[in-house]
Image (cartoon, helix red, strand yellow):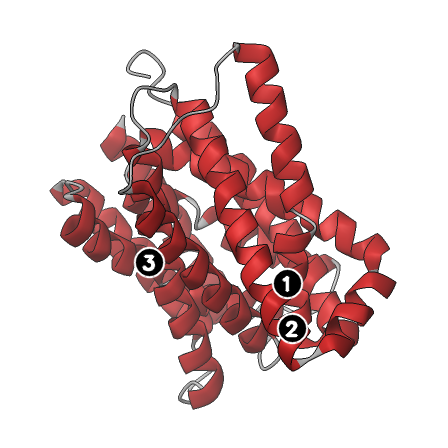
Amino acid sequence: MADLPWLWVAFTLVAAASQTARNAMQRELIVTLGTLGATHVRFLFGFPFALLFLIGVMAVTGTALPHPQLAFWPWVLAGSVTQILATALMLAAMGHRSFVVAIAYIKTEPVQVAVFGFLFLGDALTAAMIVAIVVATVGVITMSWRGGAKPDALPTLLGLGSGAMFALSAVTYRGAILSVEGTPFVMAATFTLVIGLAMTASLLSLYLAVRDRAVLAAIVKAWRPSVFAGALGALASEFWFLAFAIATAASVRTLGLVEVLFAQAISTFVFKQPTSRREAAGIVLVVLGVALLVWARA
């Protein structure tokens, strides 16, 4: 890992691009499946693809399955629960604001990741990295501000709440990956992904089976777009986890703000939602913050 200092950058860019495409797919599924159903799709249909990734890692590297210590399980359970909450809040926020602005609210996450990473994992931050996080976060806040008016309370709270849950999920999943000792980082990351998706899919399936079986039936009927969303979700998660294995969660999530740029492209060219000058100014700040982060970690 030490001789490949830029590997985490490549992992993060692939993850951000895949996640943007998956979010767009899930946004469309809200219409037929509702918020919780669209949330469940990424986990239920992503799990088989994660298993394929794990089989591929075992076949290519010849690495056996790890035997994680007891500390692994609380970390991965916390990551699973907070990821469910984060995704549900994200999709609810998208129902109130444009695609790109909803993503902007959520991407206030890096500041929270930095704090949680320091508190729970002891992840160190340099002065330049802190400046990069702040600049990029100011950019997404600028994008989320609607003209001269105050932001709407509900979508703001939903977006910020989603960002907090994504921050906790990133930190706790990184904790789970780091707790898998004595195995290559690719195996540790992929194994954690499989266990995490198994937990999230099981928890949501159980909840829907008890509370709303009609949603499960609707998911089965919408299996074609759901499979695609699940595949994109598994791909994104795989590369997020690989990045978490070799870089701090704060660094990964800050660079992941390039997702806002990808979301802007989808918002403009797919959903036909115009970009305001304020959103454009925010994009510039995001780019500056991301560039500073990459330079700080070089």
Answer yes or no: do the residues labelled 2 and 1 have beta carbons within 8 Å?
yes
The 10 Å Cα crowd at callout 1, few under 14, some 14 to 19, many 20 or more, is many
Quadrant hosting residue 205: bottom right
Measured in 3D between alpha carbons, the distance from the residue under mark 2 to the one under mark 1, in whole angstroms, is 9 Å
Q: Amino acid at mark 2?
A: Leu
Residue 261 at x, y percent in the picture: 54, 52
Comes first in the chain, label 3 or label 2: 3
Q: Residue at x 75, y 60 (%)?
A: 270
Label 1: which residue?
40
Q: What residue is at 14 percent from the left and 40 percent from the top?
A: 124
Residue that carries the numbered disc 2 in the rendered image = 208
The residue at 37%/46% (across/down) is 173
Whether 121 is drawn above or below 221: the answer is above
Residue 203: x and y in percent read: 54, 63
Distance from disc 1 to disc 3, alpha carbons, whole Å, reads 19 Å
Q: Position of residue 100 (x, y in %)?
A: 57, 65
Q: Nearer the viewer, residue 22 or 192?
A: 192
Toward the viewer: 172 or 8? 172
Closest to the camera, between mark 1 and mark 3, is: 1
Q: Residue 53: image x %, image y %?
A: 61, 29
- The residue tagged 3 is 168
Q: Which element type, helix, strand or loop, lies under badge 1? A: helix
Taking depth in this image into account, of 277 and 47 the one nearest to the observer is 47
Q: Residue at x 58, y 82 (%)?
A: 96
